[in-house]
Image (tube, helix red, strand yellow):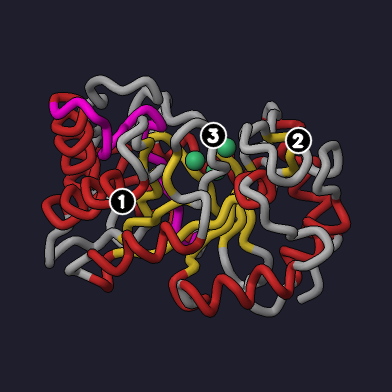
Amino acid sequence: MLKIGCHLSSSEGFTHMLQEAQSIGANTFQFFTRNPRGGDAKPLDYRDIDTFLKLKEELKVDKIIAHASYTLNLCSKDSSIRDFALRTFKDDLQRMEYIPHNYYNFHPGSHVGQGEDVGIGFIVDALNEALFEEQKTMVLLETMAGKGSEIGKTFQELKKILDGIKLQDKIGVLLDTCHVHEGGYDIIDNLEGVLSEFNDIIGLDRLKAIHLNDSINPRGAHKDRHARIGEGMIGSEALIRIINHPCLKNLPFILETPNELDGYAKEIAFLKANYKE
Ligand code: FE
Ligand code: FE
Ligand code: ZN
């Protein structure tokens, strides 16, 4: 069965998101742990979480994905920004313990002119401080488009981060189709080659989830502009090959396409219709 969902607003709680997901034919979803621009998270609503966990079990919903604020920068040049990012990251991980065995995805960060190696060093140090033995959440590094000084635009950069992590079983990778395409990887005409490169450098066993997005821009644009499925430069044929690829077809796919709920419902129905069990 295709595991498919989309990004949803968390403002009305977990139970509401799950019901919303169900109403559009989704069996997983993604949400921001807090306002994407950062700041304090809302206090946890334990009654909502309780209802959510029961319903999640009942509906046999597999893992869901929490997405960190995209403004978090664990490798900023400014130490107060790095400290803030680390505190927020740790707080998110603590909160995730209340909805155990799910994913927490984040953008590795932007080195802002310090260079990849310095940036990667900061990210590794932060992760080693944040991850803890008892945590039930797996943290995912997202592949990035390489906008500005973003780290994570190549599989090699992600591998360098992974290699520095002490608690290896707490960390994996999430592949965003728009980002890798804009990062320069040819997932349209050479999906096989890209996946085998991923496997050689990182290992496909570390790939845990996919952000399924089309892209406004041509390959290598490094701009990070998502498009609806079939309305961008990747195109629906290539995206259908992705959801059906034997190495990917059992992973959860999350849409981050510019849509309201009805648009997501249509994309989910389209992808389900084109998925081969
Ligand atoms: Fe993201
Ligand atoms: Fe993404
Ligand atoms: Zn993006």
Q: Amino acid at mark 1?
A: Asp
Look at the image and tell me in which quarter the N terminus lies: bottom right
> What is the CA distance from the residue labelled 2 to the residue labelled 1?
28 Å
> What is the CA distance from the residue labelled 3 to the residue labelled 1?
17 Å
Q: Amino acid at mark 2?
A: Asn
Q: Residue 73 in magenta?
A: yes
The disc at residue 57 is none
> What is the CA distance from the residue labelled 2 to the residue labelled 3?
12 Å
Please provide percent x and percent y for residue 20.
57, 37
The disc at residue 217 is 2
Look at the image and tell me in which quarter the C terminus lies: bottom right
In percent of the image, x 34 and y 37: which residue is there? Answer: 111
Ligand 2 resides in the quarter of the picture at top right
The disc at residue 117 is 1
The magenta span reads 61-79
Residue 153 located left or right of residue 169? right
Dot 3 corresponds to which residue?
Answer: 147
Q: Residues within 10 Å of mark 3 (few under 14, many from 20)?
A: some
Q: Answer with mark 2 or mark 1, whichever residue precedes in sequence.
A: 1
Q: Answer with mark 3 or mark 1, whichever residue precedes in sequence.
A: 1
Residue closer to the observer: 134 or 85: 85
Q: Residues within 10 Å of mark 1 (few under 14, many from 20)?
A: some
Q: Confirm or deny contact between disc 3 and disc 1 (CB under 8 A).
A: no
Q: Is residue 113 above or below residue 235?
A: above
Q: Confirm or deny contact between disc 2 and disc 1 (CB under 8 A).
A: no
Q: Amino acid at mark 3?
A: Lys
